Image: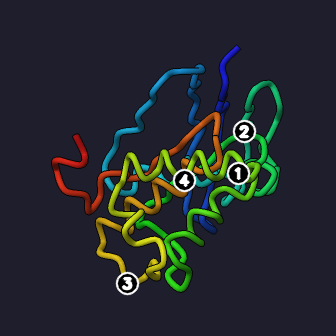
């Protein structure tokens, strides 16, 4: 059984049909990439899986459970997290507070472990812990967005445009 199954998914923005019957599966340990031009529905797909958008038809099954109509907070607790396109950090919260927001489903012990792992990946965030997120550079905000998504110990991590604004060396 696949970890994630998307079956005949349809999503609209008013009268505009964004997704029309897409199907795919993600198995545990697998990396799946959605490729397409701007407006092809990549972000819409991830936002729908995360519960931020609601589908008109179709099913989203995660670990055997139908999450199609679940609230995003329930979906995060089930183990899916999203680092959204355009960073969308909390600009008036510090780096530490942003990371804590990503870890609201984990224990204090896991919070400390996950924070240290985030600093291994993105050492600059440790230097900026008490800095407001909105004052970080674009690349640093992107690092914070990805690190925040990693804080939840997700079983399925969705990254929408994860390399946007990052230095090529860091992307590698």
Which quadrant would the C terminus be assigned to in this image? top left
Pointers 4 and 2 in contact (CB under 8 A)? no
Q: CA distance from mark 1 to mark 3?
A: 35 Å
Q: Quadrant of residue 87?
A: bottom left
Cβ atoms under marks 1 and 2 closer than 8 Å: yes
In which quadrant of the rendered view does residue 4 lie? top right
Q: Is residue 22 left or right of residue 63?
A: left
Q: Which residue is mark 2?
A: 58
Checking the image for residue 55, the label placed there is 1
Q: Whole-Å distance between the Cαs marked 4 and 3?
A: 20 Å
Q: CA distance from mark 1 to mark 2?
A: 7 Å
Query: x%, y% of residue 114?
Result: 57, 47
Read off the residue under disc 3: 135
Total number of numbered discs in the rendering: 4
> Of the residues tagged 4 and 3, which is closer to the observer?
4
**Residue drawn where x is 46% and y is 54% of the image:** 146
Could you classify mark 4 by the number of other residues whose Cα lies within 10 Å: few (under 14), some (14-19), or many (20 or more)?
Answer: many
Judging depth in this view, the residue of 94 and 61 nearest the camera is 94
Of badges 4 and 2, nearer the viewer stands 4
Label 3 crowd (10 A; few <14 / some 14-19 / many >=20):
some
């Amino acid at each position: 059984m696949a970890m994630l199954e998307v079956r005949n998914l349809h999503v609209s923005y008013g009268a505009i049909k964004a997704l029309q019957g897409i199907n795919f599966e993600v198995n545990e340990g697998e990396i799946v990439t959605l490729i397409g031009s701007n407006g092809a529905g990549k972000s819409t797909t991830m936002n729908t899986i995360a519960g931020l958008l609601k589908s008109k038809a179709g099913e989203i099954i995660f670990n055997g459970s139908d999450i199609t109509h679940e609230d995003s907070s329930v979906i995060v607790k089930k183990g899916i997290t999203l680092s959204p396109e355009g960073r969308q950090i909390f600009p008036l919260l510090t780096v530490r507070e942003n990371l804590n927001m990503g870890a609201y489903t984990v224990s204090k012990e896991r919070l400390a472990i996950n924070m240290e792992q985030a600093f291994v990946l993105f050492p600059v965030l440790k230097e900026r812990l008490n800095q407001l997120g909105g004052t970080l550079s674009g690349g640093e905000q992107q690092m914070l967005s990805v690190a925040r998504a990693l804080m939840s110990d997700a079983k399925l991590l969705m990254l929408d445009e994860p390399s946007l604004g990052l230095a090529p060396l860091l992307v590698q």
